[in-house]
Amino acid sequence: MRRILIAAALLAFAPGCESGSDNPDVATIVALSGDATSGESLYGTHCSSCHMADGTGNPGLNYPSLVEHASKETDEEIVAIVLEGEEAMPAFRSQLSDQEVADVLAYIRATWG
Ligand code: HEC
């Protein structure tokens, strides 16, 4: 089952798709089943200082609102930015396991769509 999911995620990564990243970890993580409860606590530890506990971000510091933006991004885009960082957003690859990134993604989806 897991193999089929990974294959499906890799297919979604075919050239021409808007993936935002060629990091192979992205497809692996998107194929995992995340736990939103664990993700909530990880979000509180690693993300809420900038994106706020309620996800509204900090416009004054250009920390984007996940309430407004999460639903417009693909799973791949969210996972890629968490792993690799972008501009003032730090990279979390060395701090979070694949499963932990999947958990944070599950929390974001369960909370802000
Ligand atoms: C030091 C502050 C900071 C922390 C901590 C942080 N982010 Fe970010 N995040 C940012 C900034 C700044 C951006 C905008 C990056 C850019 O300009 O491209 C961003 C962008 C994002 C985006 C894309 C939103 C968009 O509008 O494109 C997502 C999703 C995201 N962060 C999720 C997370 C998650 C999940 C965590 C915790 C694992 C986290 N961030 C931790 C500052 C932070």
Image (cartoon, helix red, strand yellow):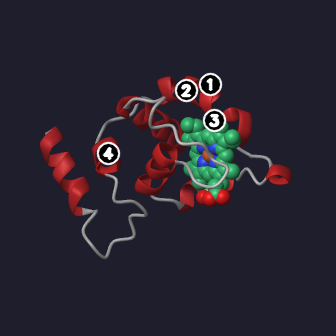
Residue density around tag 4, few if under 14, some if 14–19, many if 20 or more, within 10 Å: some
Q: CA distance from mark 1 to mark 2?
A: 5 Å
- Dot placed on the residue nearer the N-terminal end, 1 or 4: 4
Q: Secondary structure at mark 4?
A: helix
- Dot placed on the residue nearer the N-terminal end, 2 or 4: 4
Name the residue that disc number 4 marks: 25
Q: Evaluate if marks 3 and 2 touch, with contact meaning CB atoms under 8 Å apart.
A: yes
**Residue 39: horizontal and vertical position, in percent?**
50, 29
Q: CA distance from mark 3 to mark 4?
A: 20 Å
Residue density around tag 1, few if under 14, some if 14–19, many if 20 or more, within 10 Å: few
Q: Secondary structure at mark 3?
A: loop
Q: Which label is found at residue 85?
A: none
Foreground residue among 87 and 33: 87
Name the residue that disc number 1 marks: 45
Name the residue that disc number 3 marks: 47
Q: CA distance from mark 1 to mark 3?
A: 6 Å
